[in-house]
Every structure is written in C-alpha cells, then in structure tokens.
Image (tube, grey):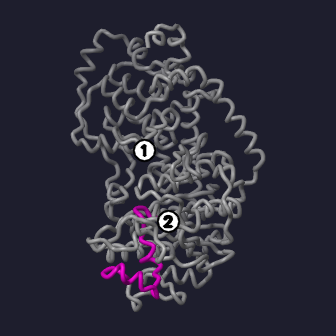
Amino acid sequence: MEYLFTRDWFYEEKHIGSKIKSPVELLVGIQRVVPVTYLQNRQLIYLQKLMGQVLLYPPNVAGWKGNKSWIDPNTLMLRLKLASILLNDAIIDMDIKGEFEDDFEAFYKEKSNRKRFIKTTKSWDVFDSKCEEVSFEALKELLIIAQVDKDTEHFMSGLEITDKRDYCIQLMSIPEYQLC
Amino acid sequence: MKRRDFIKHGTLASSLCLVPSFVKAFESVTNMAMGHKKLVIIQLAGGNDGLNTIIPYTNDIYYKNRPQIAIPKQQLIKVTDDLGFHNKLLPLKKIYDKGFLAVINNVGYPNPNRSHFRSTDIWQTASDHNEYLSTGWLGRYLDLYAKHSYGGVEIDDSLSFILKGEKLNGIATKNPAILYNNTRTPYFEKILASQTDTHLSEHNLGYLYKTMIAAKSSAKYIYETSKTYNTHQEYPNNPFGNQLKTTAEFINSGLESKVYYISMGGFDTHAGQLNKQSRLLDVFSSGIEVFIKDLEQGNTFKDTLILTFSEFGRRLKQNAAIGTDHGAANNVFVIGKHLNKPGFYNEDPDLLHLDTNGDLQYSVDFRSVYATILDRWLEVNDRSILNKSFSRLEFI
C-alpha cells in the first residue's frame, strides 16, 4: 500500500477524476457537502433502486460491475438531476420497478404517484459555515476533480455567479461531477 | 473501487477502450441493413404457473397433485386431445385458431435456479446457470447491430439488464413526453447546446457526454415520431394495457426501434392462486388481443413477433397455501402472423419424470428460442450474440 500511494504515477493527472462514481458514492458525495435528512427513508432506497445500486444488495457474488455499467440514458438523466432533486426540490418523474413477489396492483403501484418530490431537510447552514471562507473558484476545485470539458467550462464561465448555494448545485449538475 | 481495479483502470483503460470501438465499427458495416422486423418480449414476472395456463386435462398426475387448484375439465377451453387453455385465455384461443400462436412446452435450462433474481438474470443475459454475464442478450444485439439507444426500448422508467450492452444501452420509457421533458431540464439542455466539438474520446467523461447526447436525441426521436400515431383501439384500462398501447404506438408510428421489452408483474402466486392467476391471465390475454388488432390496423402485425416468457414455471404439486412454489421448465408463447409451425410446437409436459425437486424438466433450451429468433427473424448472427451455438427450432 505504501508503495502504491507513494508513487508519482498514482497521482498523475490522467488517473484523477477518471472513474464514474457509483450511485452510493454520488449520494454520499452530495451528502458530505450539504447534509440532507430524508424524511422518508424509503425514498433513499427508491433513489438507489432507480440508479441501480441498493447498498448491501449486490446483484450477485461478483458484486457490481461499476464504472460505465452505472450509466445508461435513463440513469444518467437522473444522476445529472440528482443535486437539484435533493437540494432544490426538483420533481422526479420516474417510477421504480415492482418486486417479483408483488401482486399485479403492487407491482405497478409506485407508478400512480408521478411528479413526486424527495422530501428532505437540507442543512445548508453546515454548507454555509464551511464555505464562508471559500472562494467560488476554490469551491469548484473542491467539487469537481475531473478536467472540465472546455465547452462546458466556457458555458459555466458565462454564468453569473451570485450565490454559493446555487453555484454548488450547478457544479453538481455538470457531467464532470459524475467522476471521481 | 478495489485497489487492483484502480491500477488496472488507470494504466490500461486508455489503450484498451479503443479496441472495442474499432471492432464495433467494423462489425456494424457487415450488417447495415437492420430490416423492419420488430420483436416484442414480454416477461410474466414472478413465474407464471404454466400448468394452469395450458392444462394437461387428461393427465391424472396433474389432478392428483393439485387437489384444490387443478382446473376442472369443464372449466377450460379444450384445444387438443390432452391440452386445454385456461378459460380466461379465450382471446388467446382465438389467436391460436387463426394460426398466430405457437406454444413451446418445456423450455428451460440445465440446473435451474429458483430465485426470481438469478433466474431472470439468466433469461435476460442468456447465460449458463453458473455464468455471470454483465450484458443482456438484447443489449449485445444492440452493441452489434444498432446505432442508437432507441434501437431497443423498454416500456418502463428504468432499464433492465436485458437491454444493457457493453457499448450501447437501450432506453426505457413508458411515456415519451416525460422522457423528452427530462432531457429538457434547463441545465441538461444548456450544457448540450454549448457543445461544439464531438466527444469521440473513449474516456469516461467522453462516454458521459456521448450518453447525454444519445439520451437527448433518442428521447426527442421517440417523442416526435410516436406522437404522429394515435391508436383508435380501446385498450383494457390497466398498466399492462397501457404498456401495450405505448408499444403499439411506437411500432405503428414507424419508429425504427427493433426490440421492445415489457415486464408484467404479479405472477408469483404462492397463495390463493386460482383467483389471482385468473385475473392475470385475463389482463394478459385481453391486452394482447387489442394489441394485435391495433398492429393489424397499422399493417405492422406481419412484421412483429411477440415472445412471452417467465423466469421459471411452478411446481407441479400445490403447496399448503392453495398456491404453487417456484419451479423450473415452463411454456413460452410465440405470437406472429406467419409462423412456420403454429399450435403446439413440441411434446406435452412430462409429469412422470420430474427432477429431484418435483419440477418439470426442460427439453428445449431457452437459448434455442433466442437463437431461432435472432437467426430467422432479426436475421443476425445468433452465435456472436449468444456467445455459443444453439440448435435452432422451426417455429418461424
């Protein structure tokens, strides 16, 4: 381990921010920046199911395949919207699949309440106090460790940044935030 | 991430990832013609009891093992000298009479797994019982023969294993307008709009951007194409009916999607099976009846093949809760206009020679059914998708 962590190549730029975060890494990552409490625990499970990783329930003994396998068009749309869903009360328009053991009604039950919110209490005060001394630029460095695509960079730089909370959600909504 | 993965990923990813893309480009050239045939796969999730669906009504063993849940001779629709349909399958019987239905009995695989999850994975990935694949068989079909995510559509909100490929994933939607709207959130749209150069890099960030672009263009394509067709058929008002309606709108509007996957739930009838299954078969067959009518009206039924399966059948012997437990081999339905061999394709289930759990033994490997469909219907190389050669059947 010491060998590994003391090598220069371990810290090479191309290795940093090149892995796709697992759904749990993504959720925890947001959680660490802005602590959120789920008012209904099952909504946290629901998010995990939609993104394809329920903690402690790997698909088989080989575990999750990870990296690109987390991403399909549907999961990516949700993952990019996740910060807004958790921190900005964006609605979430997706239903989870029913269980095998469900009867017909239960199997489709989740499908009746579209336009739902994830009910959370957000501890923005924690974020505020931590970020008081942090510049916008430093906040970006902190949240995005991957090299930002140059067009997106350009787009971001054209935005008027006024509020740290908004900026934080914006940063968490760009594809680069999916990487670690 | 494991340390080993980290090293592997960091040092090898860049060079290795380039290879499959080249291979893919090469292979897609060999089969440019996608044809216009459609495949609709319906999973009766939970494990449908095939023995009470197609009933061996002259078999004493059947009646002996199911004193409370066997379907009496007077209550079924007799179709052959020894097999009859559940009476809620009257619409399916009509389809059978027209020669549009083939029933393949005893479909399964060696060493059957009785977990819903594992057996579903086996059916969806077309793996061996002891093999763990990370892509679905339709996903591998997309990898080799499709150019866009919308090549394979699941009628749901999240994508199942079956449509996940190595390079290309299908897309899931049960409401194209909502899917399209989800790609139009201000941020998603603006970031994409600001993209000038195409991201051809095989690295993960490039992959993310490409997937965003694919999601957006597929959602737009599906939404704009499918809204040009409105069905005139009255579908049963239940979620399965809605899934079929959406599928028919996709097919009839001329959407280029080739494969569709629908999961209908509720078939895990451990307790109080009779009424439950009755309702389910009613929902299933009345939905299918309208679906076919709808396709006929759009003149697309001739180009559509429907395959239904369950992850397993159910045990011959009823349980103490007036239901049945997870079993093994089961029947599958193939519905299409020009079947080679409509009706009952093979022998009746053999209730005399059960496996050690008391379950039906398979005589047809489910991958033979897939191989046949890939080869004769979708006209692609079944071997490269199933990774092995399976004997083909004659139903199409």
Q: Secondary structure at mark 2?
A: helix
Q: Answer whether residue B223 is visible to the viewer in this image.
A: no
Vertical comparison of B219 with B192: above or below: below
- Report if residue B356 is visible in the image: yes
Provide residue B140's location: percent of width, then percent of height: 62, 48
From the viewer's perspective, tell me whether residue A145 is left or right of residue B317. Answer: right
Does residue B367 appear left or right of residue A75 in this picture? Answer: right
User: Hey, what amino acid is under mark 1?
Assistant: Pro
Q: Is residue B251 magenta?
A: no
Residue ID at (30%, 71%): B319
Please give the chain letter of the residue carrying mark 1: A
* Within-10-Å neighbours for mark 1: few <14, some 14–19, many 20+: some
Type of residue at label 2? Answer: Leu
The magenta stretch is: B44-70
Is B180 situated above or below A22?
below
Residue B250, placed above or below residue A124: below
Where does the image place residue B41, in percent across and percent down from the top left?
54, 62
SS at badge 1: loop
Nearest to the eye among marks 2 and 1: give it.
1
What whole-number distance in Å separates the C-alpha atoms at marks 2 and 1?
29 Å
Q: Is residue B241 above or below residue A43?
A: below
| B48 in magenta | yes
Residue at image mark 1: A59
Residue in the image at 68% along x and 35% along y: B21
For residue B244, the mark is 2
Q: Give yes or no for contact between labels 2 and 1 (Cβ–Cβ under 8 Å).
A: no
> In the rendering, which numbered label is found on residue A76?
none
Outermost right residue:
B30
Q: Residue at x 46, y 77 (%)?
A: B351
Task: For the N terminus of chain B, give its image quadrant.
Answer: top left
Residue B389 falls in image quadrant? bottom right
